[in-house]
Image (spheres, grey):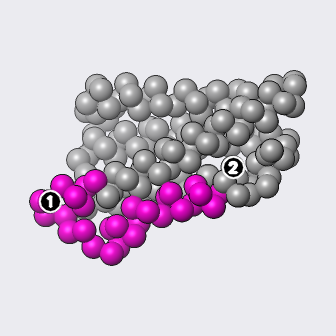
Protein backbone atom coordinates (compact mmCIF):
# COMPACT_ATOMS: atom_id res chain seq x y z
CA UNK A 1 0.00 0.00 0.00
CA UNK A 2 1.35 3.39 -0.92
CA UNK A 3 0.85 6.65 0.91
CA UNK A 4 0.87 10.33 -0.04
CA UNK A 5 4.68 10.41 0.25
CA UNK A 6 4.88 7.87 -2.61
CA UNK A 7 3.03 10.14 -5.04
CA UNK A 8 5.43 12.11 -7.25
CA UNK A 9 5.59 15.68 -5.96
CA UNK A 10 4.50 17.31 -9.26
CA UNK A 11 1.44 15.03 -9.50
CA UNK A 12 0.48 15.69 -5.89
CA UNK A 13 1.02 19.46 -6.11
CA UNK A 14 -0.87 19.84 -9.39
CA UNK A 15 -3.63 17.52 -8.21
CA UNK A 16 -4.13 19.47 -4.99
CA UNK A 17 -4.01 22.78 -6.89
CA UNK A 18 -6.70 21.36 -9.15
CA UNK A 19 -9.00 21.24 -6.12
CA UNK A 20 -9.13 25.06 -5.91
CA UNK A 21 -12.11 25.43 -8.29
CA UNK A 22 -14.02 22.72 -6.41
CA UNK A 23 -13.34 24.41 -3.06
CA UNK A 24 -14.35 27.75 -4.58
CA UNK A 25 -17.61 26.23 -5.79
CA UNK A 26 -18.37 24.78 -2.37
CA UNK A 27 -17.60 28.05 -0.58
CA UNK A 28 -19.41 30.14 -3.19
CA UNK A 29 -22.56 28.05 -2.91
CA UNK A 30 -23.08 29.59 0.54
CA UNK A 31 -22.88 33.18 -0.76
CA UNK A 32 -25.66 35.42 0.53
CA UNK A 33 -26.18 36.82 -2.96
CA UNK A 34 -27.92 34.15 -5.06
CA UNK A 35 -26.30 35.50 -8.25
CA UNK A 36 -22.85 34.89 -6.78
CA UNK A 37 -23.88 31.42 -5.62
CA UNK A 38 -25.23 30.51 -9.07
CA UNK A 39 -22.04 31.79 -10.71
CA UNK A 40 -19.84 29.79 -8.31
CA UNK A 41 -21.87 26.61 -8.82
CA UNK A 42 -22.02 26.93 -12.61
CA UNK A 43 -18.29 27.68 -12.81
CA UNK A 44 -17.58 24.67 -10.59
CA UNK A 45 -19.81 22.42 -12.68
CA UNK A 46 -18.07 23.52 -15.85
CA UNK A 47 -14.69 22.78 -14.29
CA UNK A 48 -16.03 19.45 -13.04
CA UNK A 49 -16.97 18.53 -16.62
CA UNK A 50 -13.41 19.22 -17.73
CA UNK A 51 -11.91 17.15 -14.91
CA UNK A 52 -14.34 14.27 -15.34
CA UNK A 53 -13.42 14.20 -19.05
CA UNK A 54 -9.74 14.28 -18.12
CA UNK A 55 -10.20 11.20 -15.93
CA UNK A 56 -11.57 9.30 -18.90
CA UNK A 57 -8.75 10.62 -21.07
CA UNK A 58 -6.22 9.07 -18.71
CA UNK A 59 -7.53 5.64 -19.77
CA UNK A 60 -7.45 6.56 -23.47
CA UNK A 61 -3.88 7.75 -23.08
CA UNK A 62 -2.90 4.57 -21.26
CA UNK A 63 -4.32 2.48 -24.11
CA UNK A 64 -2.31 4.55 -26.59
CA UNK A 65 0.93 3.98 -24.67
CA UNK A 66 1.42 0.86 -26.77
CA UNK A 67 2.81 -1.55 -24.21
CA UNK A 68 0.76 -4.40 -22.77
CA UNK A 69 -2.54 -2.49 -22.51
CA UNK A 70 -4.80 -3.22 -25.45
CA UNK A 71 -7.03 -0.46 -26.86
CA UNK A 72 -10.11 -2.65 -26.36
CA UNK A 73 -13.75 -1.64 -26.69
CA UNK A 74 -14.07 -1.91 -22.93
CA UNK A 75 -11.09 0.33 -22.14
CA UNK A 76 -11.83 2.93 -24.80
CA UNK A 77 -15.56 2.72 -24.10
CA UNK A 78 -14.90 3.60 -20.50
CA UNK A 79 -12.49 6.36 -21.59
CA UNK A 80 -15.34 8.29 -23.24
CA UNK A 81 -17.96 7.56 -20.56
CA UNK A 82 -16.94 10.28 -18.07
CA UNK A 83 -17.18 12.89 -20.85
CA UNK A 84 -20.66 11.67 -21.73
CA UNK A 85 -21.73 11.82 -18.07
CA UNK A 86 -20.46 15.39 -17.78
CA UNK A 87 -22.05 16.38 -21.08
CA UNK A 88 -25.39 14.96 -19.97
CA UNK A 89 -25.15 16.78 -16.65
CA UNK A 90 -24.65 20.05 -18.54
CA UNK A 91 -28.21 19.78 -19.86
CA UNK A 92 -29.83 19.27 -16.49
CA UNK A 93 -31.87 22.35 -15.58
CA UNK A 94 -31.31 22.07 -11.84
CA UNK A 95 -27.95 22.44 -10.10
CA UNK A 96 -28.93 19.81 -7.54
CA UNK A 97 -29.49 17.19 -10.25
CA UNK A 98 -26.22 18.12 -11.92
CA UNK A 99 -24.34 17.89 -8.61
CA UNK A 100 -25.84 14.46 -7.87
CA UNK A 101 -24.85 13.33 -11.38
CA UNK A 102 -21.31 14.55 -10.73
CA UNK A 103 -21.19 12.70 -7.41
CA UNK A 104 -22.12 9.52 -9.28
CA UNK A 105 -19.68 10.23 -12.13
CA UNK A 106 -16.69 11.02 -9.93
CA UNK A 107 -17.46 8.02 -7.70
CA UNK A 108 -17.65 5.70 -10.70
CA UNK A 109 -14.41 7.13 -12.13
CA UNK A 110 -12.69 6.55 -8.80
CA UNK A 111 -13.78 2.92 -8.60
CA UNK A 112 -12.74 2.24 -12.22
CA UNK A 113 -9.34 3.83 -11.57
CA UNK A 114 -8.81 1.82 -8.40
CA UNK A 115 -9.66 -1.42 -10.23
CA UNK A 116 -7.26 -0.45 -13.02
CA UNK A 117 -4.55 0.38 -10.47
CA UNK A 118 -5.01 -2.99 -8.74
CA UNK A 119 -4.81 -4.68 -12.16
CA UNK A 120 -1.42 -3.03 -12.75
CA UNK A 121 -2.62 -0.72 -15.51
CA UNK A 122 -1.57 2.33 -13.48
CA UNK A 123 1.18 2.65 -10.87
CA UNK A 124 0.18 2.24 -7.22
CA UNK A 125 0.81 5.91 -6.49
CA UNK A 126 -1.93 6.84 -8.98
CA UNK A 127 -4.47 4.97 -6.87
CA UNK A 128 -3.29 6.86 -3.79
CA UNK A 129 -3.54 10.19 -5.59
CA UNK A 130 -6.99 9.34 -6.93
CA UNK A 131 -8.18 8.43 -3.44
CA UNK A 132 -6.99 11.72 -1.94
CA UNK A 133 -8.40 13.83 -4.75
CA UNK A 134 -11.66 11.89 -5.06
CA UNK A 135 -12.44 12.27 -1.36
CA UNK A 136 -11.81 16.01 -1.63
CA UNK A 137 -13.87 16.43 -4.82
CA UNK A 138 -16.77 14.40 -3.45
CA UNK A 139 -16.68 16.39 -0.20
CA UNK A 140 -16.81 19.65 -2.19
CA UNK A 141 -19.71 18.39 -4.30
CA UNK A 142 -21.64 17.34 -1.20
CA UNK A 143 -20.93 20.64 0.55
CA UNK A 144 -22.11 22.44 -2.59
CA UNK A 145 -25.31 20.39 -2.48
CA UNK A 146 -25.86 21.64 1.06
CA UNK A 147 -25.11 25.23 0.12
CA UNK A 148 -27.06 25.26 -3.12
CA UNK A 149 -30.46 25.09 -1.48
CA UNK A 150 -32.00 23.97 -4.77
CA UNK A 151 -30.67 26.86 -6.87
CA UNK A 152 -31.61 26.36 -10.50
CA UNK A 153 -28.71 26.78 -12.93
CA UNK A 154 -29.10 29.45 -15.53
Mark sitting on residue 131: none
47 displayed left or right of 38: left
**Measured from the top left, where is residue 133 in percent x and y?**
46, 38
Mark sitting on residue 66: 1
The residue depicted at 57 percent of the width and 39 percent of the height is: 47
16 displayed left or right of 43: left
The residue depicted at 54 percent of the width and 36 percent of the height is: 136
**Measured from the top left, where is residue 144 in percent x and y?**
72, 38
70 displayed left or right of 18: left
Q: Nearer the viewer, mark 2 or mark 1?
A: 1
Magenta residues span: 61-89
Figure check: 28 above or below 125: above
**Measured from the top left, where is residue 2 in percent x and y?**
27, 40
The answer to whether any part of residue 69 appears in the image is: yes
Disc 2 and disc 1: Cα gap in Å? 36 Å
**Measured from the top left, where is residue 29 in percent x and y?**
76, 32
Task: Choose the circle earlier in sequence order: 2 or 1.
Answer: 1
Whether 3 is among the magenta residues is no
Figure check: 148 above or below 10: below
State the residue position of label 2.
99
The quarter of the image holding the N terminus is top left
Figure check: 14 above or below 136: above
Whether 74 is among the magenta residues is yes
The residue depicted at 28 percent of the width and 41 percent of the height is: 125
Q: Secondary structure at mark 2?
A: helix
Overall secondary structure of the magenta section = helix
The residue depicted at 70 percent of the width and 39 percent of the height is: 42
Amino acid sequence: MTGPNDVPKPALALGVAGLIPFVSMAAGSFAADSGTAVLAINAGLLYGAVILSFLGGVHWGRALAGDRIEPSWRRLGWAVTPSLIAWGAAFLPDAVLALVTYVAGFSLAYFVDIRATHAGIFPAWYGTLRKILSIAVLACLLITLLGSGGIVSS
